[in-house]
Each structure stands twice: as C-alpha cells, then as structure tokens.
Amino acid sequence: MPLRGDNIDTDRIIPARFLKAITFDGLGDHVFEDDRAAMPDHPFSNPAYQQARILLANDNFGSGSSREHAPQALKRWGIEACLGESFSEIFRGNSLAIGLPCVTAPPDDIVRLMVLVETNPATQLALSLSDRTVTVDGHRIPIDVADPVRDAFLTGTWDATGMLLDEFEVVRAVASRVPYIRGF
C-alpha cells in the first residue's frame, strides 16, 4: 500500500481520542481515521489495498510522539511490514517491540514501488529480511535493516515479553531474591 507524504506523525496514524482503552484491541479500525475522513481516496480507504500487508512510506514516517499505539494500529489493521525512505527512531523501536519490521530503501526505489502499486494495486511485493531484499515482478531491490534488528526478527528475539514468559521460573527466582518484592 503506497502512503505518500513526508513526516507522517503518530497523531495522524492513530488520533488521540482512540487511546482511551486499556488494550490495543480495535485500534486497526481507526488507523488514519481523520485523514480518511478528510480524503475519501486515502489508501487505507481504498478497497484495492484492503489486503495489503506491506506499507510503503516516504521520509520520517512515524514522527512525533512516542505513541506505541501507532504501530499497534497499523499491525492490527493488517500491515505486517513497513518499507520506507526513513522512520522515526521511536516509531521504529515501538514497531520492533511488536514484531513489525520497518526497513528502508533509497527514495528513488520507494517512489518507483509506489508508482508501480498505484498503477496496479494487485502488484505483489515479497520482503525478505534474510536476503535484505524486496522482490517485485522478478526484480530484487536491496533494503536496509540494521544487523541486530534483522537478527532479532530472524531468531524471534524481538519478543522480549515472550522470552520472559518462556523462562518465567528464572523471573520468579530473581524476584524471590529481591527484598522489596513479596508474593510474586
């Protein structure tokens, strides 16, 4: 799904009025709610992109606040990866924490991909973190992803909570030695 525009901030991705719940359930229904109301042809309203799993973005996507709800909303809408020119560091970190890869490619490649998908919304992109490529119509385009981030996704170590839960007896043992934690 092509989403044109630089400096798209987290307030636009998920407006603040949807942050009142104690879970992230339902956030996907409100992704870009205000933009979609103002622009009926917004990509998130376009039926041709309803099955999109890769979001194409321009420069500094996810800027603004440290709102972790923004990547949650995208993921709950159905986005499984973001490919852009650049991302806010906080947005990228919040995305990593929920298993949503944010990878980059040069601006010219992003624009070419956007034009290709806008021309033919059924275009299939395949993003490979292991190969560091996105493939479209048999052409491979290199993507950039930091080694530690790539390794975290390939090994599953991006899921810190899951790792803690897998070894919860270790957590209990450490907690039992901490004098100010009782009954944990």
Image: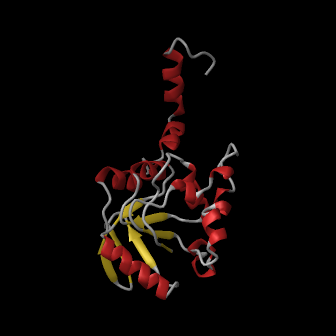
In the foreground, 38 or 28: 38
| Above or below, 23 relative to 144 | above
> Where is residue 137 drawn, in percent x and y?
38, 86
Left or right: 37 as drawn, with respect to 54: right
Residue 135 quadrant = bottom left
Colour scheme used in the picture?
A: secondary structure
The quadrant in which the C terminus is found is top right
Residue 155 seen in the figure:
yes
Specify the farthest residue to the top. 179
Where in the figure is residue 102, as x and y percent of width and height? 41, 59
- Say which quarter of the image contains residue 75: bottom right
Residue at image point 48% right, 70% down: 54
Residue 167 is left or right of residue 150, and the answer is right
Give left or right: position of 70 versus 129.
Answer: right
Residue at left offset 46%, top offset 72%: 4
Look at the image and tell me whether residue 123 can be seen. no
Which percent across, then down, holds residue 40?
A: 64, 76
Residue 174 image position (x, y, % from top left): 48, 22
- How many numbered discs? 0
- Residue 147 or residue 48, whichever sits in front: 48
Q: Residue furthest bottom?
A: 119
In this rendering, is residue 145 above or below 131? above
